[in-house]
Amino acid sequence: MRKKDDQTERYLAGLRNPSVHILGHPRGRIYNFRLGLSADWPRVFDLAAELDKAVEIDAYPDRQDLNLDLVKLAAAAGCRISLGTDSHGPSQLRFIDLALASALLAGVQPDRILNFMTADELRNWAANTRELNRSAA
């Protein structure tokens, strides 16, 4: 996680894995501790959108990963978005508001947010994405 070189190919390889549905903790950033990984984010988001994969907004306060600029890029590329809190206890679930605020400020459309899907819609998306990516592999 402390690599300084571009990690684009690593992200693209991960997204091409049919078992991966969500690119979680996209940068691995921790405020005042770790800058996070760098990549050609437009390429990463374009592939995620093409493969109908999601990227996570990790809203834990010292992560805020993706930042607002990257959420805007992901939304413009057409990525699905997963809102997460990185909670390690029930009291931290409230951080979901930060992820939602980020998605709203970035203009993410509600139909692109996994958390807004019904359980059946989410299962169907996961199955369809897995099948789409198996046939593409």
Image (cartoon, rainbow, N blue to C red):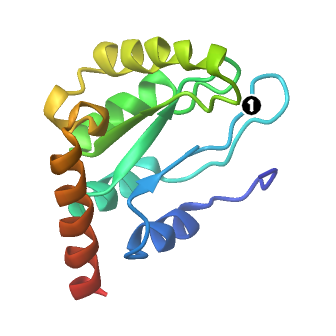
Tell how many labels.
1
Can you give x and y, in whole percent of width and height, for residue 11 in the image?
52, 63
Residue shown at the point (27%, 61%) measured from the top left: 126
| Residue 1 locus on image (x, y percent) | 77, 52
Determine whether the residue tagged by mark 1 lies in a helix, strand or loop. Answer: loop
Quarter of the picture containing the C terminus is: bottom left
Q: Give the residue at the far right of this rendering.
A: 33
Mark 1, residue position: 30
Quadrant of the rendered image containing residue 131 = bottom left
Residue 39 vertical position relative to residue 92 in the rendered view, above or below: below
81 with respect to 118 (left or right): right
Give the x, y percent position of residue 33: 85, 30
Looking at the image, which residue is at 48% across and 14% down? 98
Q: Is residue 17 above or below residue 57?
A: below
Residue sitting at 23 percent across and 31 percent down? 116
Q: Position of residue 48 (x, y in %)?
A: 33, 57
Q: Label 1: few (<14), some or many (≥20) within 10 Å? A: some
Q: Nearer the viewer, residue 68 or 25?
A: 25
Instruction: Give the residue drawn at x 14%, y 34%.
Output: 111
**Residue 97, relative to residue 87: is it above or below?**
above
- Vertical comparison of 98 with 74: above or below: above
Q: In this rendering, would 131 be left or right of 26?
A: left
Identified by mark 1, the residue type is Ile
